[in-house]
Amino acid sequence: MKLNHIKKHLDITKKLMTMSVVLGLSFVFSADYLSQTDIGIDVSNDSIVKKKKQIQILGATVIERDPNISFASRLIGNVKLGLEDAVLTCDSAYRFEDGRFEVFSNVHIIESSGIEVWADYAVLDPEVDAVEISGDVRFIHEEFSIECPALVYDLESKLVSYNQRAEIVEGNRVLSSDNGVYSSNTDRLYAGGEVDIIENDDHIISDSLAIDRNDKTLILFKRSTLKIEGAIIKCDKGNYNGRLEKGWFAGHASMEDEGGYLAGDSIVVSRNDEEGTAWGNITVRDSSGAMTIFGDYAKRTNNYDLVEGELVRLINIEEGDTLKMNSRNLVREDNMLYVFGGVVFEQGDFSGLGDSLSWDRNSNEIWLLGEPVVWSDEDEMTGDTVKMTLKENRPELMKLMGHANVLSPSNDSLDHQISGRDLDAVFKGGELSLVDVSGNGTIQYYSTDNEDIVSLNRASCAHIRIVFLDGSVSRITLLNNPEGHFENLTKESKANYPVKTRRAKPKL
């Protein structure tokens, strides 16, 4: 990167070449020769003026100067300059009256700390601490290197800054970015503008980040995607400790790996412990992608999920059928799911509620506890405990254990009622097909001849079987010594006849 007046200087060079005075070959100048004047204390205003940096000419093969041109001298061959604790070598240079140097070709800066810089061109100004360097620049600090078209290096603060696409290499890690700042004092790099990091199989993409080489910490300032050891992490900001393989991420943060998906307003990830924790608007998805859970807080390990919140929502989709479930707490261990704190679920016309629920996803067996109730279309089934078997999210078999009861609508105001100790139900296509009642079975069945005449058939026996067709009772079979009676109900007797109150069906 040359200054605007360089072209003019190149024209002057022709005159300098013809009018030059050859001062000597391999001539080494004293440290004070052509160095800058020191400025001390300005007594007139009692202010301390900053002391100019000295750029010392330590050697050159030839120095040329035109007496008629006082602002520039030319140094040719094996040029060597002293920059405080650094030494610069190059093929040629210009020195101007204001103390600036322009150096050309095979530019090499080496500091006592071991920092080295290679380039094609540089500008040195004693008024400032920074060196402008360009042309195939390569900066080396220990095992850390920067390669870019141009950079600025501050000799005092040891800061390197670049504003063109650069490649930064350290060991197996290669970082590319459009701009950045590196401090060799703190070993910290700030990079921005389409940052891309590749290290073995890991890949990081970010708009802005910082890397601390000392503690192997990655700090993310803008939207970033991290692909680390098979996991994909996304966030708006966060930090990750590569040594501990642990990080905090926020702003639409998420982590996805072979175990599933975890997202929230903020998450903490520990790759060593295979653990993730999320807070605020959380989403948890299993490895199959079929089950998704929403809540306020989640903790996830390799084979364990915990989700809590004012409302924990579960959606399970299999073969196009969707099962929805609401609760306050949910725990997954391997293929077992435990839901408690009040449970409501719904799949098409099939729904239910209870205090708690367990779901073996291997066998698709569900246990519903705590005054459970299940609805199949308009049929209501209750018991002390409900056991269900699902197929593609739809009920296939169900068992009501203890105080089993079924209410099935007869008309708008009356329900058939089937009760017993236990009840087994079979479903076809998600609809109730067959009911078997065992142990002290009783049934109240209504037949309606017209709006005014209703017949009630009461019966009891050890075993009752009811067949349903299109959601309605088609046939009732009483087994094992049935007893019963039949009566007609008038409007008056029907109004006074006790009817079992239905449970309110919840809406998800």
Image (cartoon, rainbow, N blue to C red):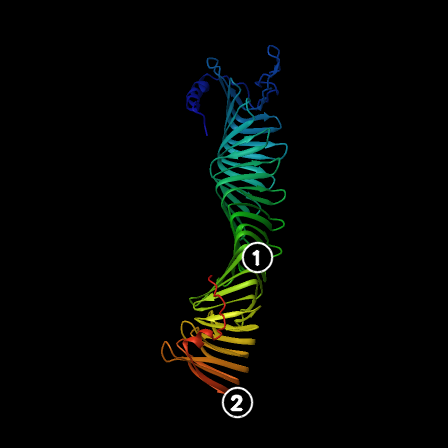
Q: CA distance from mark 2 to mark 1?
A: 51 Å
Q: Quadrant of residue 108?
A: top right
Q: Position of residue 94 (x, y in %)?
A: 50, 23
Q: At which x and y percent is residue 432? A: 45, 76
> Disc 2 vs disc 1: Cβ atoms closer than 8 Å?
no
Residue most extreme to the top: 44
Vertical relation: 125 (above or below) 420? above
Q: Amino acid at mark 1?
A: Glu
Secondary element at image label 2: loop
Q: What percent of the width, then of the height, locates residue 440?
A: 55, 82
Which of 506/391 is in front? Answer: 506
Question: Residue sitting at 62 percent across and 35 percent down?
Answer: 185
Q: What residue sits right under mark 1 in the picture?
A: 308
- The residue closer to the viewer here, 460 or 367, is 460
Q: Nearer the viewer, mark 2 or mark 1?
A: 2
Classify residue 303 as left or right of residue 499.
right
Determine the residue positioned at 48% across, 63% down.
506
Query: Of 451 and 365, which appears nearest the observer?
Result: 451
Question: Which residue is the site of mark 2?
Answer: 481
